[in-house]
Image (cartoon, rainbow, N blue to C red):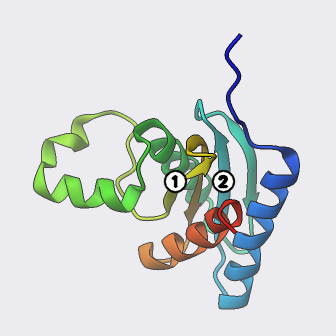
Amino acid sequence: MISRPCLAVSEIDRIMEAARIVALADGFAVTICIVDDGGHLLRLDRLEGAPLVSLRVAEGKARTAVELNMSTASLEQAVSAMPSIIAIAGLHPFRGGIPLYHDGHCVGAIGVSGALPDQDEHIALSGAHVLTA
């Protein structure tokens, strides 16, 4: 049997808490989503005042990041060079989706939505950095 790393509950808690702290400290009402390496929902937290649509978008950003094994910021740049990428159903090419790595393996992703794209990305990166600290 092949074993591969996965996100532990304690890691999910720490990732979510780090992102939440930054969002609250900066005054952003966002939704934070963490998915596993198959894009399945592990945790979803809509902060008070976050737009309802941010639930769907945060999850979409996380799924996009894990499915492509790249940040949604990188995808956003790729779309400007090759707009036909948009035709792939379900992709969310907006900053705020970051793959999560453990021992060099993609184990999931974090997606943030509800603020401006740069702010969403900053919050997502603060969560993702928990695994590299």
Check disc 1 and report its element: helix, strand or loop. Answer: helix
Question: Residue 22 falls in which quadrant of the image?
Answer: bottom right
Mark 2 is on which residue type?
Cys
Disc 1 or 2, which lies upstream in sequence? 2
Viewer-proximal residue among 22 and 103: 103
Residue at coordinates 65% horizontally, 42% vertically from top-left? 35
Q: Which mark is residue 118?
A: none
Quadrant position of the N terminus in the picture: top right
Mark 1 is on which residue type?
Val
Could you say where residue 23 lies in the image, as x and y percent from the top left?
68, 79
Residue at coordinates 60% horizontally, 73% vertically from top-left? 123
Could you say where residue 76 lies in the image, as x and y percent from the top left?
29, 59
Q: Residue furthest top?
A: 1
Q: Is residue 38 above or below residue 49?
A: above
**Residue topped by disc 1:** 57
Q: Residues within 10 Å of mark 1 (few under 14, many from 20)?
A: many
Viewer-proximal residue among 111 and 56: 111
Position of residue 43 in the picture relative to residue 68 (left or right): right
Q: Which mark is residue 33?
A: 2
Labels 1, 2: front one = 2
Viewer-proximal residue among 30 and 72: 72
Is disc 1 in contact with disc 2, using a CB cutoff of under 8 Å? no
- Tell me the CA gap for discs 1 and 2: 9 Å
Could you say where residue 63 lies in the image, as x and y percent from the top left?
52, 42
User: For the image shown, how many numbered marks are present on the structure?
Assistant: 2
Check disc 2 and report its element: helix, strand or loop. Answer: strand
